[in-house]
Image: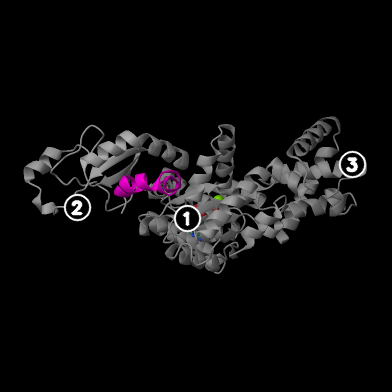
Amino acid sequence: MNEGSWDYKPFWDEVINQFNEEYSPKEINMWFERMQYHGSTESSVVVAVPSSFVQDQIEQRYARAIEDRLLEISGSPLKLDFHVQRSPSPARETRSPAAVSAGGNKSEVSDRSGSPQGERSELKITQPTRRPHPSLNQRYTFDNFVIGDNNNFAANAAMAISKNPGTAYNPCLVYGGVGLGKTHLIQSIGNTVYHDLDNAKIIFVSAEEFTNEFVVALREKKTPQFKNKYRYADVLLIDDIHFLQKKEGVQEELFHTFNALYEANKQMVFTCDRPVSDLRDLTDRLRNRFERGLNVDLKPPSYETRMAILQKKLLQMDREIPESVLDLICNNVTTNVRDLEKALTKILAYAELVGKEITEEIAKQQLKDVFVNHHQTNINIDFIQRIVADYFNLTTNEMKSRKRTNAIAFPRQIAMYIARQITELSTTEVGLEFGGRDHTTVMYACEKIKNKMKSDSTIEPMISRLIRDIRESNAKG
Ligand code: ADP
Ligand code: MG
């Protein structure tokens, strides 16, 4: 029973729980037990009461305290509204047409100023479809997800979870490189549960949003609201948890959230760009929580899966392009579904603009950037470290070490600079890959190399050569 996406029952239950401890048994018996949760609107909790008298009394005595507590628990200002429900409740059929039309469009929830008497007011709490979940993208569904050898374990686990949240695999962690469908899968779970279970409270956030929210809550002294928001989730989906590295405060918070939800058998799903064991700067106890349950990976799609993905997208858009062009795309964009989509979109846009059939030649010309970028974005930082280290006759361990002699510091700075040039890693991520250095160190290294390039004309050709070697060795795998 729910209208739209509003369901504050868990907050209401918690208020009653807390009040049961705080108020006398007499008051509980006399007033609190006469209120039943009835429904929610966007900004209110509606309780059913047996008479207007009870409503008036509760309003005068407790409404304030209840609303204050709701605010504390939910983090948002929720009004307490009443619905007078006589028992045994008269059948709906007894409503006269006049009474119905008198209700008109006015909300049928009685407000504080007076309650519609004699008429059984109906709260519109069931609607045929839930409005879209505010933080889920409707496009991400299992129907739209092409299953291949690379992802079938993860996809099947995700589908099983969405059928039985909290019981099948809990927690579940999906990991894999950029553009392989992590966000698509985790949101598909959210969308499915959201549509199948009317009452389920689903929270989807990126680890970055979770962190920012936590920081704001700390600053504004609203951590109880923050905690409550997350601890009342039925399904908690957190995308890209690698973002939590080095952020101890928020790791600690998530650890407690995890435990609370785990105890309550609430479903949790996380995604990460690498296996949890490869995460650095993560507390052991949180790592241990992530490794509980099921860890599944997404691998790059095979040629057949890439082709199937493109064909599915064409079918959905009711468009066609020649087989040879599809083949060209599949051969050049090999490890990343996002780039595969980008290539297709670009070709389709071009075809539409010039109104011509796309040939292989045109496609090659049009997709030059996509192909090049694609090769760039998937360069593994290990290759960079290895090739730069070889060039300077060092070991990769020396590059990552704390040593600061010029013989090591300079090659390290070169490698950091190159990593920033040809990968999408942030300065923070690059720093982590070099023995857990701070992002400012990486920024400093890049500045230093740029300046050196200006004053020393041998540097630039050396870097170009290194980049070429890195690309080649990366392409060979
Ligand atoms: P990630 O979160 O792993 O970086 P995304 O989930 O954002 O990747 O996926 C990138 C794009 O590729 C999205 O548009 C997504 O819909 C699409 N995609 C990924 N995997 C598949 C798949 N197996 N079938 C269809 N589309 C996919
Ligand atoms: Mg993602």
Examine the image and state in which quarter residue 411 appears. top right
Image check: 283 left or right of 295? right
Could you classify mark 3 by the number of other residues whose Cα lies within 10 Å: few (under 14), some (14-19), or many (20 or more)?
few
Amino acid of disc 3: Arg
Question: Mark 3 sits on what residue?
Answer: 404
Kindly identify the amino acid type of the residue bearing the numbered disc 1: Val
Query: Where is mark 2, residue-wise?
Result: 87
Secondary structure under the numbered disc 1 in the rendered image: strand
What segment is highlighted magenta in the picture?
Answer: 16-38
C-alpha separation, residue under disc 1 versus residue under disc 3: 48 Å
Question: What amino acid is at disc 2?
Answer: Ser
The secondary structure type at the circle numbered 2 is loop
| Callout 1 crowding tier (Cα within 10 Å): few <14, some 14–19, many ≥20 | many
Q: Nearer the viewer, residue 30 or 406?
A: 30
Q: Earlier in the sequence, mark 1 or mark 3?
A: 1
Residue 274 percent location from the top left of the image: 65, 57
